Image (spheres, rainbow, N blue to C red):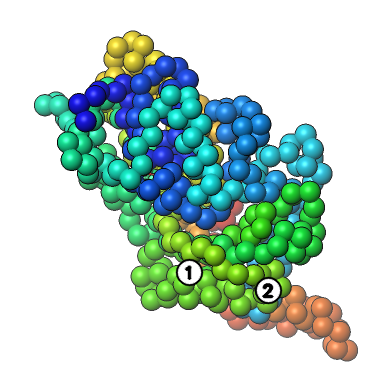
Amino acid sequence: MKETFDVAIVGAGPAGVSAACILADAGIKTIVFERGEYPGAKNMSGGVVYGHDLAQIIPDYVDHKCPIERNIIESRIWYLSKEGGYSFGYRDSIFAAERKHNAFTVLRAKFDRWYAEQARKKGALIVPSTVAVDLLRNDKGGVVGVVTGREDGEVRAKVTLLADGINSPLAARAGFRVEPKPEEVALAVKEVIELPSEVIEQRFGVSNGDGVTIEILGEITGGMDGIATVYTNRNSLSLAIGANLADFATSKLRPYELLEAFKQHPLVVPLISGGQPREYIAHWLPEGGYDTIPALYGDGYLIAGDSAMMFNAMHREGSNLAMASGRMAAEAIIEAIGRGDCSRKGLANYGKRLAESYVLKDLKKYRRFGRFRYRHKEIFNEIPALASLAGREMLTVNGVSKKQKQKMIVKEVRRKMSILRIARLLWHSWRAVR
Ligand SMILES: Cc1cc2nc3c(=O)[nH]c(=O)nc-3n(C[C@H](O)[C@H](O)[C@H](O)COP(=O)(O)OP(=O)(O)OC[C@H]3O[C@@H](n4cnc5c(N)ncnc54)[C@H](O)[C@@H]3O)c2cc1C
């Protein structure tokens, strides 16, 4: 391709497309490369998107027919043992009224396609089925464009934005980020299970297109540091389960085995019964947190979203961090192009913007959270089993006094965990979230 662009973006996920929208709005000549057959083809199944960050880019996204599956009015947390578990939840009518679309579910194949179409309408050139295989460098090492897998596939640009997600080795190959260690990445599998809308509404106690998310911890990840989720879509449920890659390597458990066992759990069976599996996908998640974020910009390039390890594992937020970082990258690029300085110094406002925003503040707050979960495997082993024992015993009416039951539970806790271990767990958990 002989044409030159102001900005080349690698990846048409939430980070890349958010940047493309802002750049195209400002009249910046922008090209986006996407390796999938269409944006979203490599992301497929569902997840939660947050209205606040999307509205910063497309304020009237609902009027523009954003493919919203369900508006989330309730978040549940389950803590499960093998046979049972605890369920907590928070539902609020504010999320069906003033704060409607605070969070909503999407199917990524539809959402990413719709989002990229908004960028195209604004003037960005979206090029699917095209893999960026390398970066063009000048003799000082600065990035001056992208090498694609196409014939005659070099494209020159003043600035390149790497928004290629966690699964892409491009940033690592270019030396801009180190390959994440296995313990800094989670491997998740997801299945979409089709069910009639009215069945979903009845099972989750919702109506009018509202929905529920369930985040699940406990023994369901086979003792590994991991999490499972159930999200309601219009006519389907998105089920996901994942665990730390290093834990998968040592446990020899297979992701699809986890998913199958999860689907058999007594709390899950009634939700999915009668459903038809439709899609299955495996994907990585960046879980290393703040300490694994690479240098975010350099001469002629910036990195955003998952590619920059921006995932808040505590709150399961990634799409919003991708959108926010893509937007801030675009704003910094517009200023740099305006000043005619796309060097590292010229792009430095990206780092400043991110540091002042919730994106880096939140990641910094939870910087110890990933390590905490990885090191304290009792969260996924002994504690859910003991919690279940307590629940079972206290709910069983069998003539044994509650005092006696309490003594038995405490004895069992002391048998499984020393006081020192409990104290260490409490102290580390406080430090991980404070
Ligand atoms: C199982 C699972 C569940 C999740 N659930 C949620 C959730 O509920 N809420 C939430 O906020 N976040 C969730 N996330 C995280 C969220 O999906 C990511 O944080 C978000 O998609 C990151 O956006 P991104 O644009 O940085 O990267 P991506 O969405 O990964 O997009 C990167 C794009 O770049 C393309 N690409 C990669 N390499 C190249 C290349 N060399 N050339 C051309 N194109 C390339 C890819 O095909 C892809 O389309 C979940 C993730 C997983 C795995």
- Residue beneath the point at 43% across and 51% down: 41
Does residue 355 appear in the picture of this structure? no
Query: Which circle, 1 or 2, is nearer the viewer?
Result: 2
Badge 1 or badge 2: first in the primary sequence: 1
Q: In this view, does 372 lie to the left or right of 332?
A: right
The front one of 330 and 185 is 330
The residue wearing badge 1 is 224
Whole-Å distance between the Cαs marked 1 and 2? 26 Å
Does residue 40 appear in the picture of this structure? yes
Whole-percent x, y for residue 59 in the image: 61, 27
Q: What element carries label 2?
A: loop
Q: In this view, does 4 lie to the left or right of 17?
A: left
Whole-percent x, y for residue 275 in the image: 64, 70
Mark carried by residue 232: none
Q: What element carries label 1?
A: loop
Residue 279 against residue 294 in the figure, above or below: below
Q: Is residue 239 left or right of residue 165?
A: right
Q: What residue type is labelled 1?
A: Met
Which quadrant of the rendered structure holds the C terminus? top right
What is the total number of numbered labels drawn onto the structure image?
2
Mark carried by residue 273: 2
Q: Residues within 10 Å of mark 1 (few under 14, many from 20)?
A: many
Q: What residue type is labelled 2?
A: Ser
Whole-percent x, y for residue 94 in the image: 79, 40
Residue at the far left in the pictured view: 139
Q: Does the residue labelled 2 lie within 8 Å of ligand 1?
A: no
